Amino acid sequence: MAVGREMAGQILDPFRGMLKDAEDRKVEAKGLAELREIMAAMEKHAQEMNEAAEFSMKLYNDGYYTKFSTLYTKLITSQAMTAEYDDAALLKQAVGAMENSYNQLKDNPDHVHIIGPVKKAIEIGKSGVSYPVFLRTCEEQGVYEMMKSGNDRPVIEFYIHVAEVMFDPVRKKMNEAILAKWEELAKASAFGRPDPVEFGMWRYTIEWQYEPAIAKWKAIYDAWERLFDIVSDWRDSFCSFAPYDERWVDPRGKSATLENIARTQECNPGYLQVREAQFKEYFGLTWDDIFTHVTYQNEQKAGRVWYSDENLELMKAAHPLCKPGGKPSGDIIAKTEAMFKNKTYTSRENVTGENMKKSPYDFKSFAEFAKKYREDGK
């Protein structure tokens, strides 16, 4: 399944326009072939990937945006330099190529990392300098270097923002560390930008350092969520609604459904014992520790715990009874049946289940970052 044509067009149309411009200008054949190759690779990824955001990040992380724009500018400028020398004409053509790139990229927030240096080059070209001075000034001020490496800062800031609104504290801390390293390297650079190779190495190092913490956080969350499911299913299997619940209803008929219910009643206590033993061994946590652990409190705050408080309290009451040969008390069963009848088993704050509500994630935020950096020209 490919990225939607409209979404793919928003991302790729600026580059398609630049490719056509390069073809119309009949730039150097080898460079044009390379430009077409980059374009073909981007088009191929659009066909192979499903999500527009994932597609855009793929192009960014693999350097397609920067490689294409840099090569396009180089080809247009080189073509002008090989023609009969005319200082004013060469300057006009070089600045025109920059303006064309800027106009193609400025409204797409995915390209915010290279907007600043392109804008800076245009400003230098229009400041009244000659063509040689234009080239020398761009070189001295690191404009060409910035075009190659772009400005990662707004992208990193956006990752921090996303981690914050998605209640992902580990990735937020990781990206804050990446931003701190970016600022440290930028401060030491003559051009106010980190060397892309050095920064890339540091970035991979920081991501590698945080990978165990990210994996551990997810493993703990997955573990206690599974414990909830085991206890909840065991408790609910004793209720009068069980034979009609999709968890046990079997298309083969009533007898098969009753077998499914009996299996849950007989096997879940054993499953619980094994899972709890693993939970204790791997993380040093028990059932009671779940409700004070940072992962649980974070998921509650984010509205991602599916179970309502009422359901969780009944689950806590049923937990010590979930043993081989055990059964929930009559009071627990009655309250559980009433809860399902009243449809109060899910959290009203839950953003992923029946009570789905709009995510706090705001897709306009990246555009706001882009606008800021376009205006600042940084």
Image: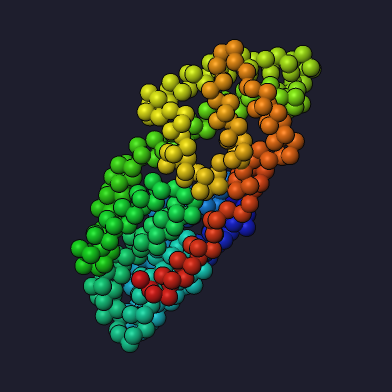
Q: Quadrant of residue 304?
A: top right
Q: Position of residue 70 (x, y in %)?
A: 38, 63
Q: Residue 44: in sight, yes or no? A: no
**Which residue does the image show at 29% across and 73% down from the upper left?**
138
Q: Spot the residue most to the bottom.
A: 128
**Which residue does the image show at 72% across and 39% down from the upper left?**
343
Is 224 in front, or is 154?
A: 224
Q: Spot the residue most to the front.
A: 331
Q: Position of residue 28 (x, y in %)?
A: 40, 63
Quarter of the image for the N terminus: give it.
top right
7 to 356, vertically: above or below: below
**Which residue does the image show at 45% across and 63% down from the upper left?**
111
Q: Quadrant of residue 372?
A: bottom left
**Which residue does the image show at 42% across and 42% down from the upper left?**
294
In the image, taking residue 329 as reference, residue 296 lies left or right, namely left
Q: Position of residue 301 (x, y in %)?
A: 51, 48
Q: Residue 372: in sight, yes or no? A: yes
Q: Position of residue 6 (x, y in %)?
A: 62, 58
29 to 279, vertically: above or below: below
